[in-house]
Image (cartoon, coloured by chain):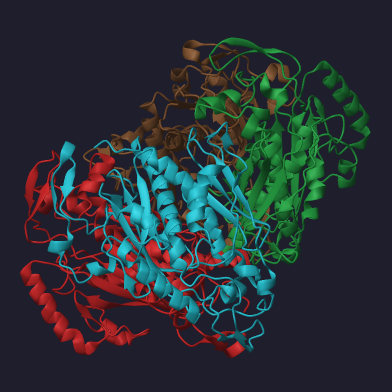
Chain colours: A red, B cyan, C green, D brown
Amino acid sequence: MNTFGHLLRVTTFGESHGPAIGCVVDGCPPGLPLAATDFAHDLERRATGRTRHTSQRHEADEIEILSGVYEGVTTGTPIALLIRNTDARSKDYTAIAAQFRPGHADYTYWAKYGLRDPRGGGRSSARETTMRVAAGVIAKKWLAGDGVEVRGFLSQIGEIRSSRPETPDWADVEANPFFWPDAAQVPELEAYMDALRKSGDSVGARVDVVATGLPAGWGEPVYGKLDAELASALMSINAVKGVEIGDGFDAVPMRGSVHRDVMRPGAGGAPDFDSNHAGGVLGGISTGQALRCSVAFKPTSSLRLPVESIDVAGNAVDVVTTGRHDPCVGIRATPICEAMVALVLMDQALRHRAQCGDVHPAR
Amino acid sequence: MNTFGHLLRVTTFGESHGPAIGCVVDGCPPGLPLAATDFAHDLERRATGRTRHTSQRHEADEIEILSGVYEGVTTGTPIALLIRNTDARSKDYTAIAAQFRPGHADYTYWAKYGLRDPRGGGRSSARETTMRVAAGVIAKKWLAGDGVEVRGFLSQIGEIRSSRPETPDWADVEANPFFWPDAAQVPELEAYMDALRKSGDSVGARVDVVATGLPAGWGEPVYGKLDAELASALMSINAVKGVEIGDGFDAVPMRGSVHRDVMRPGAGGAPDFDSNHAGGVLGGISTGQALRCSVAFKPTSSLRLPVESIDVAGNAVDVVTTGRHDPCVGIRATPICEAMVALVLMDQALRHRAQCGDVHPAR
Amino acid sequence: MNTFGHLLRVTTFGESHGPAIGCVVDGCPPGLPLAATDFAHDLERRATGRTRHTSQRHEADEIEILSGVYEGVTTGTPIALLIRNTDARSKDYTAIAAQFRPGHADYTYWAKYGLRDPRGGGRSSARETTMRVAAGVIAKKWLAGDGVEVRGFLSQIGEIRSSRPETPDWADVEANPFFWPDAAQVPELEAYMDALRKSGDSVGARVDVVATGLPAGWGEPVYGKLDAELASALMSINAVKGVEIGDGFDAVPMRGSVHRDVMRPGAGGAPDFDSNHAGGVLGGISTGQALRCSVAFKPTSSLRLPVESIDVAGNAVDVVTTGRHDPCVGIRATPICEAMVALVLMDQALRHRAQCGDVHPAR
Amino acid sequence: MNTFGHLLRVTTFGESHGPAIGCVVDGCPPGLPLAATDFAHDLERRATGRTRHTSQRHEADEIEILSGVYEGVTTGTPIALLIRNTDARSKDYTAIAAQFRPGHADYTYWAKYGLRDPRGGGRSSARETTMRVAAGVIAKKWLAGDGVEVRGFLSQIGEIRSSRPETPDWADVEANPFFWPDAAQVPELEAYMDALRKSGDSVGARVDVVATGLPAGWGEPVYGKLDAELASALMSINAVKGVEIGDGFDAVPMRGSVHRDVMRPGAGGAPDFDSNHAGGVLGGISTGQALRCSVAFKPTSSLRLPVESIDVAGNAVDVVTTGRHDPCVGIRATPICEAMVALVLMDQALRHRAQCGDVHPAR
């Protein structure tokens, strides 16, 4: 089950330290301009080694388009993308091949398959998310042609919270290594992360994603609801432990009289909403407001700090991780979350067009 | 997209006030004993009108098995279940047929399809979840044969929180109308709900679901991860706005040295875990620990309190809901959440058996 | 796997002698006028007991629409259709419950599932095809709105062949009980079938289906090719053993210089084809010509003539079938084949619209 | 829709003259030994340029395994295979970029997508089938571990028919360039093909595929029937126009008393069949006999002989194909047909195991 989506289908493959990673994007409409250079910006945003706050693995992440594009535009046939792994230092991991790192998928892959590729986490490595970002670039580009924009920012690192505006100043977000919306807090974050890195420990993070420009009407009840598919797409990202739409868990103590977003007559018969507690989705279908979702990332489990564990024979061992890792995986996760949201939206847009005749609902 | 699951596929149909609701459960293994009476218990737990704290709609909810069962056992062919709607008072809703109730799917269905069935919310009504519970009964029964049990409880109503034990005393949970694990708090809840009902307002709730007895090894990376499918399944339930696995959003401020659940040598080569912050899933695959997930329900939007809105012509209107509604939909949601978790688990168990040879991983 | 189609999804359920058969049609566009009476014509064409040449089982086949239609039009939500079985004489089959009828699915169901519903063939009965015809009515109606018509006729019964025109006089086809295109041959067929019935034996048949009005451009390479999906859809009908597109097996001895259909300048830039050996499909995509397919039905295996077989214990037995059966199942198969072709076409039309923007390709 | 299969899923990508072709095989059980050298034999059997009777394009067809294999065995994660295109002479095709070759997918791709990759047929080229053969190698290997063998032979070239034994002498089949079962006929075929090649024309062919060693019980009624999926899989191969199971169209004039294969008590409670008219499938489920299917290939449309056609502007043109082509594409199709049958069987075996507990049915 390495395929994602119904009409826009993304199949990814590849292990962290295998020869290559790649994906096949099937179902893309023909005629979309696409070049290898289109992928550079988002891959760079996701890349490790960009600042001292992320893993020091340096991958060139050069995308090769193997199919589906002719004379600079998509042809409607499957788009295959390939990235060769160039900085795969398998020797870093040899020592722990027979050990299970706590908090990682080492034990569960082994329990499931009876064997596993131990090099850098193999298939369970966050390296796989590179191809999600690449596929997401195609979705973002297609959506942009329709006026839909998907952006994300960090709203929490460890105990530090941002202001969580519905739509921050995106220039601010991109101007710091944390995708942080509040420029004034950045020095505090730098210090926080430096201290954390020195301690050898890690923290979690919260990423908020906002999609603007959506029409009302995207989403398929009842098991293909827009929010249900977002939840699955986001929860499938490595280290994610929670997903919220709109106010999420904050809705639990709220009163219905407050949470239900009041509608007033707006332009062209469409409603103006007083608020957006629902996060832009009602009954699994977009309302035309900004789509808001929020994602919890757990703290990285790969630490310099030793930890007790067991090996494949069931014996007690001490595990020390010496590879290159992120003190907060959530930092680089913003473009990954954006990509997953964009892929869900494009898939839903195509499905809406199939059943109802156009990408844009009639009203 | 009214079908759910890959190998165990549930297709539901029916509107709140149409002639009937039903489902088709395809892919169930043959030989499972199944009778119409098996459904009574969970349908009763989900039913309205059981106490004064839920909607006063009284549906008999009598299940008819139309296919797939012969001489008391499943045959491997699709199991069709049917419930006739008997207490559908369409007149309650006539007045608001052309109005969009805020916080409901009225506007979004209309925006998507250009028309809608306004009787009791039509397809978007929580009535649909009856068939989820029914399908879930089959999954629970099959899982029980394998030692897997799926149970839920309420961990929060409005501002009131329960103790959230990993596995509560289930007899206590079932002994009160709130699926509440702490018997001592029940009188407080009764008073809280009585006051709420009198105010005409509603609140949200949080439901926790625990599955015990799982082997390590269920789940399919990377887009069919166990937690990703749970997220989708739970988020697809009416009024759900958030899903967590394990510690969920509480993992954000945690340190990795705390969150990574330490493994020690256990019985038969399997690990003993010191803790279960991950909620029983690593890398999208079960660890063999208890599976823990938590779901946020928003407060019901159908209130006696009037609210401004618009109608299909885009004019301002006042909406007053006079039908029978729940002051807290989350109360009846426990069996629905259990059902969705059970369906995901059974589907994953079958998929694991397909690829790896047995329901129970070798180790 | 009782679901068929990608965007227009048909799920059928029910056994020959169970309480009911039914289907759920999901993904139908909203706004299509639909009433229970729409189904009568095609169900009557498929029905047994219409003439002495088909099985004498008399089913009322009255369709109840359970969902998905409001005020006479489809709403975009799943359409559930139900038919109660009223003439299920289970006693006819009791004697052979433990026996395997040669040429039937008795043995294979039992081998697969370890048990089976022996009443009238259970799930493997051609009774299931009633719901295919019902679902096909919806597809035909939607396609007709787009100028696409799907019709079928019998081109062979046993040794007797019809003239096989590309598009026969459909009034002639419907004027005789054999869906036969050549009126002059009908008396010969009547005599042939009377003699066959008296002999207690059966013969096979060949059904031709023609779809006209298709635009060029429907079909999805490479595994969702229009012809590949037609092949699957038609081969899934009970008793089908062969499927051809265009000239089919007659293309084997042909020369390429003859088979390749020459294109000449036609109206509006579209080609005029000199011939249609390809049957209206090239590279899995419709050419805009008439779509032609042909289907082989084997002779019924249920005969009055006794036959040797084995029982569930592996012992030799003599099987005599005393139920009501067709001396040539292919006769009633014409509307079933039409239905399957219509369902494939509508599904492909929706998929084309999703990816390429409109049901009708730009050229 | 470039993905094939339900649990064993093959996604192919690539154009005839693009940088590479490839596939992703997802869902393969872990622990299957697999090396790049495993693919050589079947790719060689499918390769062009092996004899004078096939196209003179010479592709090295060297497979690179990019993922899913660790230390020589499959890991359960997706297996990506890549072949670089090395002998793509795009200049051969430049002249006809704006022309539609009759009998090819040129016009239909253009009608569907509004544009097309004209280099060697782009995605519609038979080059794509290379990856089917590669994926089929994995399926064959896995099935062989279970005693199931899938083999094919040519039963007709143009007007010349072979003896069509149920299971020919496979050494004879492999000893000649035509996969022909009757050694004595080979000189006649050589002369026939030489004359054909000189004439500049082409003929069709019929390929028979036989799978032996199947248990009874594989297949999923009613829309995932074994024969229905075989029909789709085989019809999806380039140039295929017909598919038969067992006696196929020859069953039409047969009597039911002859066609129904008599069962007698056999070893271990399983039946001994007197005959195999059904081709090893009843009710969509395998009987345990040899699975027999037959496939019609049309004559190649790419000929040296000029032909009238139109161009993208709708003008009349003369098309002359000067590229390297096969006078009979069916000759190289045998391994492709085998591959598709093997992939269907493995997928069905996994699905059977999922629902019924083991690859081998209990009886």
Name the quadrant containing residue B1. Answer: bottom right
Q: Position of residue A215 (x, y in %)?
A: 53, 77
Percent across and percent down for residue C229 are: 60, 46
Q: Is residue C149 visible?
A: yes
Looking at the image, which residue is at 63% across and 15% down? D262
Query: Relative to residue B189, is residue C282 depicted above or below?
Result: above
Q: Nearer the viewer, residue B141 or B99?
A: B141
Left or right of residue D136, residue C211 in this image: right
Task: Tell which of A78 and C196 is nearer to you.
Answer: C196
Q: Quadrant of residue A335?
A: bottom left
Question: Is residue A40 visible from the viewing direction of this image?
Answer: no
In the drawing, does residue C294 fall left or right of residue D89? right
Residue at 54% x, 54% y is B131
Position in image of residue C194 (x %, y %): 88, 23
Q: Depth check: C132 or B345 in front?
A: B345
Query: Residue D363, relative to residue D315: is it above or below?
Result: above
How many numbered discs, if any? Answer: 0
| Closer to the camera in the image, D199 or B354 | B354
**Image location of residue C67, percent across then percent down:** 66, 58
**Residue in the image at 9% along x and 41% along y:** A315
